[in-house]
Image (spheres, helix red, strand yellow):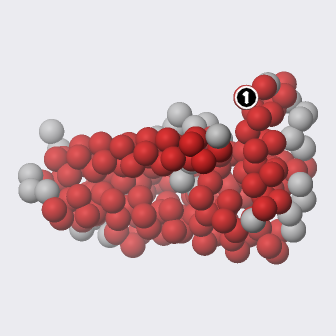
């Protein structure tokens, strides 16, 4: 088995599309793609780690801003899925958090998939000014992309066995860290 898919010419494009899709559909493995490509970058040098971080950050900003624009132009209750109890609870939670501290919420929500969607929809729906929203979401997205890619890169450096082992272990570490963040955020909400 080789890493052709992970270090080929389309790797950054595929990763970016997964990150973009992850902004709307939480089952899309955007985080895993960034972590895996970070591991590949660290072991093979192709693509360079800075490219992984840059492309993932741009895709994350694009996804978050698109959610913001949906919330701003469509609102937060137009479609039936927006009115389900789970989504309403998430949006109410998001509204309360945004009122308490926009920067903190945008930074932390970037690491929690469903919260990220709710926060960005609510940021648009509550008409947070773009001049305030855009710089915060950009910094959050690039911080997230650097973190995700670094997890893969660090695991690859610490673990012998080549890129495939590094990808596998770094994905397991990323999923574990994501699960831990989910547990902590659930406990903080309750």
Q: In which image quadrant can residue 137 be found?
A: bottom right
The tally of labels here is 1
Q: Is residue 180 left or right of residue 44?
A: right
Q: Which residue does the image show at 80% across and 51% down from the upper left?
A: 96
Asked whether 146 or 111 is in front, the reply is 111
Residue drawn at (77%, 35%) of the image: 89
Q: Quadrant of residue 176?
A: top left
- Residue hosting label 1: 86
Say which quadrant the N terminus sits in.
top left
Residue 86 versus residue 29 in the image, above or below? above
Closest to the observer, 80 or 10: 80
For residue 47, above or below residue 81 = below
> Residue 160 in the image: x percent, y percent?
9, 56
Q: Position of residue 126 (x, y in %)?
A: 89, 54
Q: Which quadrant, please, contains the C terminus? A: top right
Q: Please state which of residues 7 and 130 is positioned toward the viewer in this rendering.
A: 130
Which residue lies at the image location 18% right of the left edge and 64% below the top edge?
157
Instruction: Mark yes or no: residue 33 visible.
Output: no
Q: Is residue 149 left or right of residue 77?
A: left
């Amino acid at each position: 088995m080789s890493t052709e898919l992970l270090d080929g010419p389309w790797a950054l494009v595929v990763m970016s599309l997964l990150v973009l899709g992850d902004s709307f559909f939480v089952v899309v493995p955007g985080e895993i793609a960034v972590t895996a490509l970070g591991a590949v970058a660290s072991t093979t040098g192709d693509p360079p780690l800075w490219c992984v971080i840059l492309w993932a950050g741009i895709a994350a900003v694009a996804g978050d801003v698109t959610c913001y624009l949906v919330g701003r132009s469509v609102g937060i209750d137009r479609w039936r899925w927006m009115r389900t109890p789970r989504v309403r609870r998430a949006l109410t939670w998001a509204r309360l958090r945004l009122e308490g501290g926009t920067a903190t919420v945008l930074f932390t929500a970037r690491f929690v998939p469903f919260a990220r969607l709710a926060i960005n929809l609510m940021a648009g729906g509550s008409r947070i000014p773009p001049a305030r929203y855009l710089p915060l979401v950009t910094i959050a997205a690039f911080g997230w992309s650097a973190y995700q890619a670094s997890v893969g890169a660090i695991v690859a450096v610490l673990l012998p066995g080549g890129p495939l082992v590094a990808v596998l272990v770094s994905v397991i570490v990323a999923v574990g860290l994501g699960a831990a963040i989910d547990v902590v955020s659930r406990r903080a909400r309750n």
